Amino acid sequence: KQEVTQIPAALSVPEGENLVLNCSFTDSAIYNLQWFRQDPGKGLTSLLLIQSSQREQTSGRLNASLDKSSGRSTLYIAASQPGDSATYLCAVPSGGGADGLTFGKGTHLIIQP
Amino acid sequence: DAGVIQSPRHEVTEMGQEVTLRCKPISGHNSLFWYRQTMMRGLELLIYFNNNVPIDDSGMPEDRFSAKMPNASFSTLKIQPSEPRDSAVYFCASIVGLAGVSNTDTQYFGPGTRLTVL
């Protein structure tokens, strides 16, 4: 059974810092890995989706990398801003298509102004 | 597009009562997912449908939980009877695609229903 772990569980940094969030998964036979953002009381918003054949994906100040063989992914946030404060979740699908996702418990990020 | 719509947004009920949560997926999406989020267990997949057919319900915790998708634009998750440990946020998500068929899209989540069982 796939298990997804995220480290750290919580992180508080001053504005402007670059930071790295970590995600690991136990079964490397994944088709993709996704990073989501969740704001308090809200649903999930997709940030990046990395296919298994890709090494990384970038969107603005966000960069996600994937190392299938080691079962790891990182989300890099450059020049953090208070608006980045949220919970960040990584998830992998049970299959290759429209299959259910297995989520980590998330990293709760606070960016201090 | 209005996105995934869930109702109600908040539900408070007493133990033993029946609870029905509703979801309208994004138009044109043929797969729908129900998840539950708690502090202790995080986000867990309960059940999902492809083309209105349940594909995997192994995440449904007990027989007290049931889900239906009578048509492409509507799904319900029912808990009967409800218990305090069912208190959680229930999310619905949808996507275009089929289980086991390569997909490059992400799931789109609704705002969730916060359920409190007293």
Image (spheres, rainbow, N blue to C red):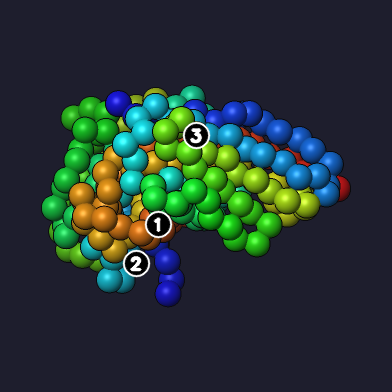
Question: Residue pushed farthest bottom?
Answer: B1
Q: Chain of mark 2?
A: B
Residue at 18%, 30% in the rendered image? B63
The vertical placement of A14 against B109, above or below, is above
Looking at this view, is B49 or A11 the one in front?
A11
Q: Amino acid at mark 1?
A: Thr
Label 3 residue SS: strand
Up-down: is B97 above or below A86? below
Residue position marked by numbered label 3 in the rendering: A72
Q: Position of residue B59 (x, y in %)?
A: 27, 33
Is residue A74 found left or right of A109 in the rendered image? left
> A106 left or right of A93?
right
Q: Amino acid at mark 3?
A: Arg
Residue A57, above or below B43: below
Residue B37 place in picture, x, y as percent = 44, 37
Q: Dot 2: what SS?
A: loop
User: Mark 1 or mark 2, which is nearer the start of the sequence?
Assistant: 2
Residue at 21% from the left image edge and 55% from the top image edge: B101
Where's the N terminus of chain A, which quadrant?
Answer: top left
Choose mark 2 or mark 1, whichever is in front: 1
Where residue B41 appears, as percent x and y from the top left, is 44, 27
User: Marks 3 and 1, how far apart in space?
Assistant: 19 Å
Identify the chain of the residue marked 1, using the numbered disc in the image.
B
Which residue was labeled with disc 2? Answer: B26
Q: B67 and B117: which one is in front?
A: B67
Q: Are marks 2 and 1 in contact (CB under 8 Å)?
A: no
Q: Would you say residue A38 is visible in this rendering?
A: no
Horizontal and vertical percent position of residue A110: 73, 40
Distance from disc 2 to disc 1, alpha carbons, whole Å, reads: 13 Å
- Residue B73 seen in the figure: yes
Q: What residue is pinned by disc 1?
A: B106
Based on the displayed image, in which of its 4 quarters is residue A74 positioned? top right
